[in-house]
Image (spheres, rainbow, N blue to C red):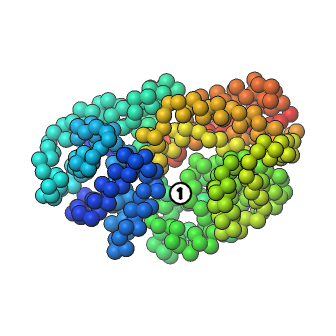
């Protein structure tokens, strides 16, 4: 069986360099043993040596993510258990390199690596889904229970593929065609995506954040599935819209561009630092119709009862639909967190739905593929006291194996 992960072709004829491999091992120590977030660790690692070029940084980032993604499979093949000491991590690294067809140098860390045994173990374990897809038992059981065996098998395979880089064009400042031409001049090739009006997909990974186009606010990096949410909200210029869990504001900024900067967007969140980040992004995007409010008491919500034409609840969730871009979440998530988050989702729906005025609309969205966080939450809400004033208009379930993008859910409700 062929190994189901692809990395840059240069890895196949690349010689392993000690300093790059050490960076990977250091990163894995922080992620696996100290519970640090993979994206933050990798950001730090990439600043480690100014002499590293794009290839070196690509190797460190992608190899680290890869070993995080396949942790269970590699640990099983390497016959090591957590907490991993450095010797264990080198053994997992040797498994990674062997399965990639990379020749191991004669360093002491790789002495006695059983290359043939590694490939045999891989073939054996690939017959068992929880090892093949490298996920905890509970996650595999829950996925199958909620989606059924056939769908879950395809979905978890898709959620283990590396996420592509998708840009959302900021139509307040430019057009898709102009941005595509500007990036093309920098040797960054992109393509349009059918059914995603403001999206550009990178043909190859590139550091788009260092471009003038990014600094000028011509685009944001935002997965294609996430770009469907603001569209689902049916906003019009001049409306009053409330984004209740705005965070750093990816969807808020999209709403601002759909509203052509006309009307009012109130961005709410319990974390002030996230709203500060939104403020910075809004300035760069030229979005002037956003007002940030931190939810520091229930008063903030109550003041807005019956006031909004549109309310977006981009609810906190398990993140089961975005494991491609957060592979370490497979190891951080716990079953009791999912139970807790479902209670939070329902509480938020009950409270925040009161901000919708008569005739207004509400979108409930999550980046999860689990029906218990999605359709079931809507069903519970609609049969509750607060939900009896709402009618269900439509919903959209986005599965990664069908769309090629993140797993998402969105439901549109209207207040009677």
State the residue in front, 404 or 280.
Answer: 280
Residue 369, percent across and down?
Answer: 55, 36
Quadrant of the drawing holding the C terminus: top right
**Left or right position of 186 against 230:** left
The residue positioned 39% from the left and 36% from the top of the image is: 135
- Residue 171, visible in the rendered structure: no
**Left or right position of 43 against 395:** left
**Left or right position of 377 against 56:** right
* Residue of label 1: 166
Quadrant of the drawing holding the N terminus: top left
- Residue 213, visible in the rendered structure: yes
State the residue in front, 247 or 407.
Answer: 247
State the residue in front, 413 or 240.
Answer: 240
Residue 27, percent across and down?
Answer: 36, 55
The residue positioned 66% from the left and 51% from the top of the image is: 271
The residue positioned 40% from the left and 48% from the top of the image is: 34
The residue positioned 58% from the left and 69% from the top of the image is: 214
Q: Quadrant of residue 80?
A: top left
Residue 233, percent across and down?
Answer: 73, 46
């Amino acid at each position: 069986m062929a190994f189901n992960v692809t990395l840059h072709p240069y890895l196949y004829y690349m010689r392993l360099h000690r300093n790059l491999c050490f960076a990977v091992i250091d990163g894995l120590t922080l992620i696996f043993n100290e519970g640090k977030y993979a994206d933050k660790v990798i950001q730090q690692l990439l600043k480690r040596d100014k002499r590293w070029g794009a290839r070196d940084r690509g190797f460190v980032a992608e190899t680290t993510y890869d070993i995080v993604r396949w942790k269970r499979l590699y640990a099983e093949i390497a016959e090591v258990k957590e907490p991993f000491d450095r010797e264990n991590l080198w053994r997992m690294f040797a498994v990674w390199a062997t399965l990639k067809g990379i020749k191991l140098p004669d360093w002491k860390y790789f002495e006695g690596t059983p290359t043939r045994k590694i490939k045999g173990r891989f073939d054996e374990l690939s017959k068992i889904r929880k090892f093949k897809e490298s996920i905890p038992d509970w996650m595999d059981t829950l996925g199958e229970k909620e989606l059924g065996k056939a769908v879950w098998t395809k979905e978890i395979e898709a959620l283990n593929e590396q996420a592509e880089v998708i840009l959302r064009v900021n139509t307040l400042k430019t057009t898709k065609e102009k941005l595509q031409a500007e990036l093309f001049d920098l040797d960054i090739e992109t393509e349009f995506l059918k059914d995603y009006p403001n999206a550009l997909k990178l043909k190859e990974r590139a550091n788009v954040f260092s471009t003038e186009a990014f600094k000028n606010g011509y685009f944001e990096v935002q997965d294609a599935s996430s770009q469907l949410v603001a569209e689902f909200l049916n906003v019009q210029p001049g409306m009053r819209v409330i984004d209740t869990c705005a965070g750093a504001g990816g969807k808020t900024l999209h709403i601002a561009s759909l509203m052509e900067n006309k009307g009012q967007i109130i961005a709410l969140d319990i974390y002030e630092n996230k709203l500060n980040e939104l403020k910075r992004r809004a300035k760069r995007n030229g979005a002037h119709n956003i007002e940030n409010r931190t939810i520091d008491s229930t008063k903030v919500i109550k003041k807005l009862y019956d006031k909004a034409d549109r309310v977006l609840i981009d609810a906190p969730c398990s993140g089961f639909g975005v494991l491609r871009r957060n592979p370490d979440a497979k190891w951080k998530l716990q079953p009791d967190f999912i139970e807790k988050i479902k209670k939070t989702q329902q509480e938020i729906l009950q409270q925040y739905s009161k901000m919708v005025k008569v005739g207004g609309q509400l979108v409930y969205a999550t980046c999860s593929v689990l029906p218990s966080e999605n359709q079931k939450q809507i069903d519970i809400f609609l049969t509750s006291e607060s939900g009896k004033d709402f009618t269900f208009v439509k919903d959209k379930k986005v599965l990664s194996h069908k769309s090629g993008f993140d797993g998402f859910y969105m439901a549109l409700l209207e207040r009677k």
